[in-house]
Image (spheres, rainbow, N blue to C red):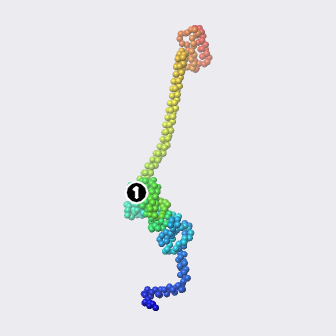
Amino acid sequence: MRRQGPPSEIRRLATPIARVVDAAWQRMHWWIALMVMLYALSGITVVRSDEIAVVQRWGRLVGATPALQEHGPGLLFAFPRPIDRVIRVQARRIAEVTITALNDQAPSQGETGYYATLDPLMQGYALTGDQNVVHTQMVARYRIRDVAEWAFYGPPSDDVVRVEVSAAMVRSLGEMGVDRVLSDGRKDLIALAARRAQAGLDAAHAGIELTSLELTRLAPPAAAAFEFEAVQSAYISADTKKKEAQAYAEMVIPQAQARANARVQAAEAETAANLAAANGDASAFAALEREYRANPAVVRERLYRDAIDRALNVAKVRWIPPPTGGRYSGLRIILSSPAAGPTRARAAEQDAEKESEEN
């Protein structure tokens, strides 16, 4: 028979606890079984229609691929905590965060000394590319794009978006002049800052997609607001005058061009007409020259008569030829003016014929 040693201190202390547990099991065994069953069923999670869930088992995602890691709407069966941890995300919800890190966070305008200076330690600001100070306030909207990355990222989403958007805006403002920033460069500024903020979120594996970025305030410091407004008004006035001048030029230049084209066409038409007339005169002279060579006397007499007709400038000139086989000295011409009637002209012709017969 083996001889047992004296009981140890641990056994002596554990014996009363074992008796209490045994007594509780004898009286409440079905309650304990119910609690164990409820604990086992606590891993069942209901995923809503607008949610996506992922499961972490001992701190690691369950699933080899992103498609297997993400679970859609319905019942999701998992082990209870601390074995599994179910993270549900409203992936379709657009969250909104206001970013005031670069704003002056100005007090009311009635406070004394507010417009006097700018405290760079207490008030936010940013510098433009030409070393001018501006204040800006933004509203960023985002959604969860990659649930797995978002589940493992440490800082809260709003804080991450604030940091990345503020850094991107500071860098973008530093590459643009204040005149462009405060006038027609806002659209380019927002696009550049949003693109850089998204690149920063992707590099940090935050699992966040920036859907929109809105500038709710972009202004110079209050101490220099009046001067900036004056410069801005002058810039707008100059731009307006420039556009008016361009509009006037667009109206006047076509009219002047049309008049110039009309004058050029008229000159070309006159040139063509004069050239045609000169060619016609030259052709007529050449034909007359050929006719004169063929019959000089007839052509000479005809030209002489035509010249006399043009020189006298009367309605009718009648040439009295000499008698047949004879001649008379002197030149006899009967002229009839437009005022003389047909009877007087005929009588003058008969008198001239009688005088010719007598000679």
- Estimate the x, y position of residue 45 in percent, counting from the top left: 54, 72
Q: Name the quarter where the C terminus is drawn.
A: top right
Residue 49 position by quadrant: bottom right
The residue most toward the front is: 1
Residue 200 position by quadrant: bottom left
What residue lies at 45% left-to-right and 65% top-to-bottom? 160
- Estimate the x, y position of residue 18 in percent, counting from the top left: 48, 86
Report the front residue among 115 and 235.
235
Indicate whether 154 appears above or below 218: below
Residue underneath mark 1 = 174
Indicate whether 308 appears above or below 265: above
Amino acid type assigned to the residue bearing label 1 in the image: Gly
Indicate whether 274 appears above or below 71: above
What residue lies at 54% left-to-right and 12% top-to-bottom? 331
What residue lies at 59% left-to-right and 14% top-to-bottom? 348
Total numbered labels placed on residues in the image: 1
Report the front residue among 16 and 261.
16
Q: Residues within 10 Å of mark 1 (few under 14, many from 20)?
A: some
Q: Is residue 284 visible?
A: yes
**Circle 1 SS class:** loop
- Estimate the x, y position of residue 355 in percent, counting from the top left: 58, 10
- Estimate the x, y position of residue 5 in percent, counting from the top left: 43, 89
What residue lies at 41% left-to-right and 55% top-to-bottom? 176
Q: Is residue 87 visible?
A: no
Report the front residue among 178 and 282.
282
